[in-house]
Image (spheres, rainbow, N blue to C red):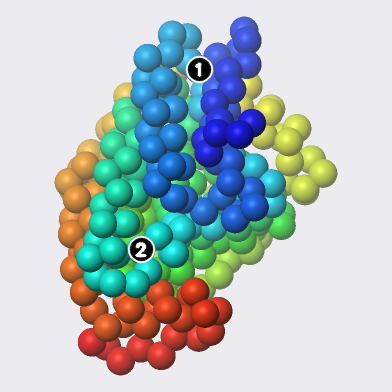
Amino acid sequence: MSDPVHLDLTAGTGIARVTFNRPKVLNAADVALAQGFLEVVRQLQDMAGLRCVVLTGAGRAFMAGGDVAAFAGRREQARAGVNALLDALNPALLGLRSLDAPILAGVRGVAAGAGLSLALAADLILASRDARFLLGYDRLGVTPDCGGSWFLPRRLGVGRANELMMLSRRLDAAEALAWGLVTETAAPEAFDARLEAMARQLASGPTRATGAFRRLTDRALGSSLAAHLEIERQTFLELTESSDFAEGTAAFIEKRAPSFRGT
């Protein structure tokens, strides 16, 4: 499994497993992973008999956000890096949400930044009891991307979303369950079996109705995901011009606390 995103279809079940596969860097999203994810989603869109999609991460984490090193540095480099990622991730998210098949995320370890957004793109989330959830964008001086600011208020409400963003809240699996961020938790030793059982239950359901229900609920609460993804992109790009973003990315690379000035 050497590709940055691996696709495996279990024969006879219609269950497709999509695995983010950069375990040495906790599956942080770089351009290759983003493009690989888009290619996998396109394969899913063309797949006959698809009954359920399971999103997971290889190794110790679901995904530790975007690869900050790819857009740290000069402003031009930041804009180019962000656009290269989102040019692939945004259509991948839209393609994923267009499927009839239910989407289940299985989260071990950390789901941070874009990783949290991608987990939230699933209909249901199973979290290992050692999982942790955080946004982290506030530490860089920017706003969420990959639908984070679209999914979070819908799942948690604006107040909880504000708490995650503005107070740098980190949730363990029990807190995430209490907040309604995840559907269910499982002990680490039982996680794989429970994820398989949930996937099989979903795969046995009425997938056309599932897809129709997702599209109805997406439309019921205001702006479309497609429109919101572009609003997020422009907001993120504007903020890459700020001194706070330069400080936030430098602090991240240097493994120190940032010192923001609001400029």
Q: Residue at x 37, y 20 (%)?
A: 45
Residue 234: horizontal and vertical position, in percent? Answer: 18, 59
Quick check: can you spot residue 81? yes
Using the rendered view, name the quadrant where residue 196 is placed.
top right
Q: Observer-nearest residue: 145 or 257?
A: 257
Residue 32: horizontal and vertical position, in percent? Answer: 43, 42
Residue 198: horizontal and vertical position, in percent? Answer: 63, 30
- The amino acid type, in three-letter code, at marker 1 is Arg
* Circle 2: element type: loop
Q: Observer-nearest residue: 218 or 73?
A: 73
Using the rendered view, name the quadrant where residue 77 is placed.
bottom left
Q: Is residue 88 above or below residue 81?
A: above
Q: In what quadrant of the picture does the N terminus appear?
A: top right
The residue carrying pointer 1 sits among few (fewer than 14), some (14 to 19) or many (20 or more) residues within 10 Å by Cα, namely: many
Using the rendered view, name the quadrant where residue 152 is placed.
bottom left
Left or right placement of residue 249 versus residue 130 in this view: left
Mark 2 or 1, which is nearer the eye?
2
Q: Is residue 138 above or below residue 14?
A: below
Left or right placement of residue 223 versus residue 250 in this view: left
Q: Residue at x 21, y 42 (%)?
A: 226
Instruction: Identify the residue under disc 2.
Output: 71
Q: In what quadrant of the picture does the C terminus appear?
A: bottom left
Instruction: Identify the residue under disc 1.
Output: 51
